[in-house]
Image: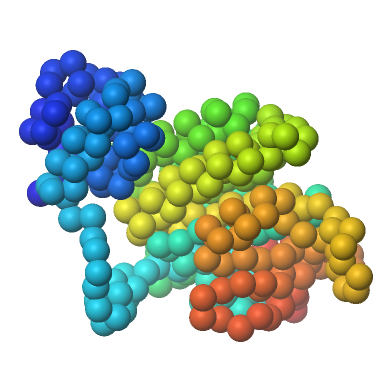
Amino acid sequence: MSEELELEDLKGVGSKTAEKLDEAGLNEGMSIATMSAGELAEKADLGESSAQTIITSARQKVDVGGFETGMDKHERRKGMKRITTSCEAFDEILGGGIESQCITEFYGEYGSAKTQISHQLAVNVQLPEGAGGMDRGAVYIDTEDTFTPERVEQMAEDKDLDPEEVLENIHVARAFNSDHQVLLAEEAQDICQENDIGLVVVDSLTAQFRSDYVGRGELAERQQKLNKHMNTLLRLANSHNAAVVVTNQVMSNPDQMFGDPTKAIGGHIVAHNSAVRLYLRKSKKDKRIARLVDSPYMPEGEAVFKVKDRGIIGDN
């Protein structure tokens, strides 16, 4: 059965419940089937027992997956796509570029080029597949009001793309707090359904959470909410074979005796949900250094790149 469900075909769903699910944006089979009963109950204002009945029915109608052989996994990975960073050395440490079906995290201090890379990827995803793109659009969740259309135009022109068309293919939303950010990630599911989206950007992932949850007493609640948010993003990556890129702020680790004391915000929650992690830092003049910190199959490595008017380029 298609993931586009007739809601009233699900066990436990009458006309009123179908209306509640639809109002909550829950008309996509995979999303319902992979939710917990508590999560569905909260989103659609249902009892947990009713929510569990609906989830069980959805799982029977949608192929949510289960055990598979390593070869099955290998075959699915063949459908994975990549987006070029516009820097050959950068692409090389990533194994060819930013990949779909997972979350890639960029973290670093202010001015380390996190937002510049986000803009560049939102342009590059629209390139033809043979030119390092996916020929698809982007969703951009902007939490710090840093999305700049003029910057996108510059980068698009350098790639011989129509700037207006590129901007039309980027769906931008400004998140004003962490609740709004979570809601926008859920709404991105509909945008991905209705449009051919190959990239979802959250710039920055943790800024609003840090503002809304202050002090150690609220840390557990913040981390729980952040975990659910990242699970939503991961579902987007897998459901639509899209690349998900999040940028992250940093803090100083006072326990670090030697080396760079900088560490990413979000702790283990962000680290475990991000398949690929890169640490960005400033170098001399317009140079930046990207260090691959974690990847399922690529060794640690570094690449030097520059930020120019035309966008991200190699250090040539």
- Taking 195 as reference, is 158 above or below it? below
Q: In the image as oriented, which residue stretches furthest toward the top?
A: 16
- Please state, as top left, top right, bottom left or bottom right, where the C terminus lies in the image: bottom right
Q: Is residue 119 left or right of residue 254?
A: left
Q: Position of residue 70 (x, y in %)?
A: 29, 80
Residue 91 seen: no
How are the residues colored? rainbow
Q: Position of residue 239 (x, y in %)?
A: 32, 53
Q: Residue at x 71, y 78 (%)?
A: 302
Q: Quadrant of residue 148?
A: top right
Q: Quadrant of residue 207?
A: top right
Q: In the image as oriented, which residue stretches furthest toward the front?
A: 49
Q: Position of residue 211 (x, y in %)?
A: 72, 32
Q: Residue at x 50, y 42 (%)?
A: 229
Q: Nearer the viewer, residue 35 or 308?
A: 35
Residue 45 seen: yes
Q: Residue at x 56, y 74 (%)?
A: 295
- Taking 304 as reference, is 249 above or below it? above
Q: Nearer the viewer, residue 199 or 222?
A: 222
Q: Residue at x 33, y 42 (%)?
A: 35
Q: Is residue 37 left or right of residue 114?
A: left
Q: How many marks?
A: 0
Q: Position of residue 96 (x, y in %)?
A: 51, 77
